[in-house]
Each structure stands twice: as C-alpha cells, then as structure tokens.
Amino acid sequence: MAFSVYFFIGWLSIVCFFIQKKKYSVVENTVLFLCVLIVNLNWTWLIYEEYGLITYSHNPWNFIAYLIKRSIIIPLIVLICLNFGSKQFSLLKNLMHFIVSALVILGLTNVSHFLKVTTVKHWSIFYDFVYYILLHVLGLVIHKWYQTYMVEKDKEGLTK
C-alpha cells in the first residue's frame, strides 16, 4: 500500500514540476535538485542510521516507498516551492510558501508513519518541520550563491 501511495505522489510531484512555469533555468534547477538531494540524503542517514531516532521498515516495498519519498518527493517539493516564489514577492510571502511546502512534506511524513514505512523512537514532528524549513532556506541560499558565482564568471568571461 505504501509503495503505491508514494509511487503516485512521486509521479504527481514530477508532473507538477515539469508543467510548472519555472523561474530558474535547467542548470539552476539541476544544481538545486542535486544539492537538496545531497543534504536530504545525509540528514536522513544521520537520523535513521547513525542516531537511530527514526527507523524505517525492512519490508522491501515499504523501503522502496521510503526511498521514493527521500530521494524524489522531498527534493522536488522544495524545488517546486523555490520555483514558485518570485523576486516581486515579499519576504513574508516567500516565508509563507516555505511554511506551506514544509507542511505538505510534513503531511507526507505523517502518512509515512501511518503506513508503517517509518517508526518514530525519540523524535518530534516539530524537529521535522524545522528541518524542512531549513532545507528550503538552504535551497534559497545555494541558489543565491550559484547566481552570484555564475554572474561573476560571466563578467570575467566578457572582460577577457
């Protein structure tokens, strides 16, 4: 059951990302996706494997559902949220986008607990919420850094 739910949500998030009008270029979206994916993989490895605060199911189909959520759904939802924002939006509107996106991911985390894909030992849902907000902020910071780096590279290329 969990596999089919996350498989559907994974494809839905992929379709939503591709039909969305994107604010960033293909290269920027790729860099953002990979950076958010790397951070998310390392974070889940620490929380699940090293500290043992949350455990995942050893049922193969539930584990695949966990991998789909961790590796596809969460980075894509963050990317959708970052592409949804605009430079004309105020900081408050962008923060609201981050909060709504984090709440959506938090809802998927609750579905994961309900379907016994993951089991919480010594963890609070508030920690997940803070992490998802910080993941969005990190994506924004990485994008700002990448834009600054690429603009400097373009200026150097034009002056040579």
Image: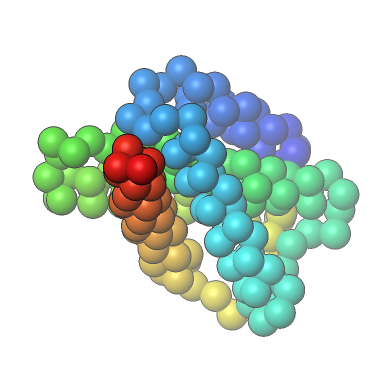
Q: Is 72 displayed left or right of 74 in the figure?
A: right
Q: How is the image coloured?
A: rainbow
Residue 158: x and y in percent read 32, 38
The answer to which of 106 and 50 lies nearer the viewer is 50
Residue 124: tell me if it is visible. Answer: yes
The answer to which of 48 and 19 lies nearer the viewer is 19
The residue that appears at 51% across and 45% down in the rendered structure is: 31
108 to 132, vertically: above or below: above
Residue 140: tell me if it is visible. Answer: no
Q: Is 95 displayed left or right of 29 in the figure?
A: left
Residue 80: quadrant of the picture: top left
Residue 16: x and y in percent read 48, 24
The residue that appears at 41% across and 22% down in the rendered structure is: 20
The residue that appears at 48% across and 30% down in the rendered structure is: 26
The answer to which of 50 and 144 lies nearer the viewer is 144
Farthest top residue? 19
The residue that appears at 42% across and 30% down in the rendered structure is: 25
Residue 97: quadrant of the picture: top left
The quadrant in which the C terminus is found is top left
**Number of marks in picture:** 0
Residue 11: x and y in percent read 62, 27
Residue 3: x and y in percent read 75, 39
Farthest front residue? 160
The quadrant in which the N terminus is found is top right
27 to 47, vertically: above or below: above
Q: Is 59 displayed left or right of 123 in the figure?
A: right
